[in-house]
Amino acid sequence: MGKCLFVGIFLGILLSIFMVADLSIAAPPDAPHRNAIIFVADGLRNGSVNPTDAPTLSMIRKQGVYFSNSHSLFPTFTTANASAIATGHYLGDTGDFSNVIWTGYPTFDTGNFGLPAGTPTPFLENDPILSDLAAHYGGNYLGETTLLTAALNSGFNAASIGKLGPTAIQELESVAASGGRFPANNRAIIIDDSTGTSAGVPLPTEMLAALNDAGLSADAPARTNGYGATSLWNNGASGTHHANVVQQQWFADVATHVVLPAFAKDSAKPFVLLFWSRDPDGTQHNQGDSGGTLFPGINGDSSRSGVHNADNNLRQLLDWLDANPAIKAQTDIFVTSDHGFATISRREISRTGRLTAAESAQHYYLDANNNAESAIGTLPNGFLAIDLALGINTNLFDPDRRTPDGVPGPYRQVRLKPEFFEHPMSGNGLVGDVIYKADGSDARAIVAANGGSDLIYVPDKNPATVKQIVTLLATFDYVGGIFTDDQYGQIPGALPLSSIGLVGSSALPRPAIVVAFKIFDLKPGDIQTAVQISDTSLQEGQGMHGGFGRDSTFNNMAAIGPDFKSGFNDEAPVGNTDIVPTLAHILGINITAHGALQGRVIAEALKNGPDRIDAATKRAESSPANQLKTLLEYQLVGDQRYFDRACFIDASIVDGMCQ
């Protein structure tokens, strides 16, 4: 396979120097080199790890370091946290604010990939869209060097394997340098759902030959075994009862039969391998155990099978290391999940079963053929965009659907009339009287629908519009917290974006408002039973994340290897932003940071580190609006913030708490 095969693989999920606490720990002991494996179990809740469903993950907790006070970044979405895992920076620096953002331009407007100009509110789990975004923003839309890129530049071998989107985020600079298209011999080896298709990153000839020699297809399998439900809309009873076994087994086989053996042959070079398991996220999203009801939600057999599937993939990687003890002795393993999870509600807004009174829930909504597809009393996909348009008394346009020939303007108007109520196709909306610009910048407001939280952009940055929207949001019974861009000053009912790390050095458009939806636990105090109002096309009872409850911020993190302590429970707050600086420290890689919003080296987890790190618990409250205040609960290590939860609290209650 030769050195050239992996000289350009993807190592970006680990390194961007992010030190807040004073690090007086020595470098790792002299050794030929250190390797690192980062294993991401997408959507794995901390409370879902147990010896029955996840014996391998449980073993690492017990034998290595268990980070029992771990944190996802908010908004708690995959690509947002992938950017943090890749760079060690908060979202204000990376600009990857959610899975769906407003890019500030219509995607593919330069004809990249031979595609016509598309939506200005794309879903980022897509390789061509990531490449186009990177090319548009100077070769790396994140604005920070990823660990993978830094490792490649430092002479490491590196690979990124797994879920479409977060896998490619780790190393996009060489792709963007080719004009936003994938070169025939891309510097990075990226293996994901699109591998083998025209939308995927091409593999070098040597890699294709190695796959053939191992008896593996060069094309990634589809997400089979019932992964995709036939109808995910509101009242259907569809959904999967199987984990994503076939596709992920192929990823694990590629890692252990091709990539790691190649690294072993090129033993003069250290390596970093990222493996991003699509499960349990995909199975929890689409599980069919609880269609239309909140119980068992994402706690049924299908979701548990997704956890076990991810655990099996990790076990296969560890088995390869066990069979190669010399490499194992030099390899540190860091396990994380990008975010937690909750069960979807599109009707109830409290554990008592109280139903939403939102105007958007008072109508039937029609599909493209004018057939009713949601019942009255149910929040439709795009409910926030609909309610804003109705509340401001203006029109709504769908940035994901083009107008028919002969109709002025680029985007189709969403009909919101008594006789015809529609919803935007993907939930995103351009709110305004008329829209003529392809980038949507003539809208009064742009809603990027994501799930447990949504982003609202105000393109002309009019402070009066921002205040009007916040005032309106405080009256919506499904809203559970509001954050606004600092440039608009203190707005009643809202806390500033800077309080959650969303104001930094990024060149991407920053949302004016971030809206967190309401969360409640079916069993008080048990976040495994959490329910989340979600702006999604998935059905009631299926799974979603993105909210600002501990159910979504409490991810799963653990580490094991020659540089980590054994049998250590780290009770200090840690988060996804800390992975890169910690591994960069171990691997001896320095990364120049552009922004200041960085994580820390987890010194207390390292063998030569301190026994404990001092931390403090803090809270911040907004001024009231509609008798409600946004409360933020967080923890501090030095100046480093770790976000626990946020919610609306009754302004009349002193020292109120989120549930």
Image (cartoon, rainbow, N blue to C red):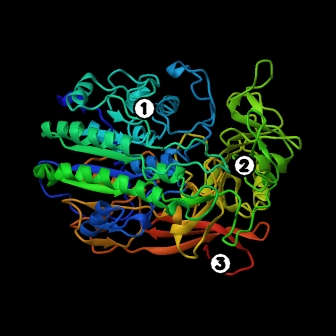
- Can see residue 468? yes
Q: Secondary structure at mark 2?
A: loop
Q: Nearer the viewer, mark 2 or mark 3?
A: 2
Tell me the amino acid under the disc marked 2: Pro
Give the structural element (helix, strand or loop) at label 3: loop
Q: Which residue is mark 3?
A: 656
Q: x, y percentage for residue 292?
A: 64, 56
Residue marked by disc 2? 380
Disc 3 packing (10 Å; few <14; some 14–19; many ≥20):
some
Q: Earlier in the sequence, mark 1 or mark 3?
A: 1
- Residue 582 appears in the picture as rendered: no
**Mark seen at residue 194:** 1
Quadrant placement of the N terminus: top left
For the residues labelled 1 and 3, the Cα–Cα distance comes to: 48 Å
Q: Nearer the viewer, residue 360 or 187?
A: 360
Q: Is residue 93 left or right of residue 589?
A: right
| Coordinates of residue 123 in the picture (x, y in percent) | 56, 39
Between disc 2 and disc 1, whose residue precedes?
Answer: 1
Q: Amino acid at mark 3?
A: Gly
Q: Three-letter amino acid code at disc 1?
A: Ser
Q: Position of residue 42 (x, y in %)?
A: 43, 52
Q: CA distance from mark 2 to mark 1?
A: 30 Å
Q: Residue at x 17, y 28 (%)?
A: 2
The crowd level at tag 1 (other Cα within 10 Å; few <14, some 14-19, many 20+) is many
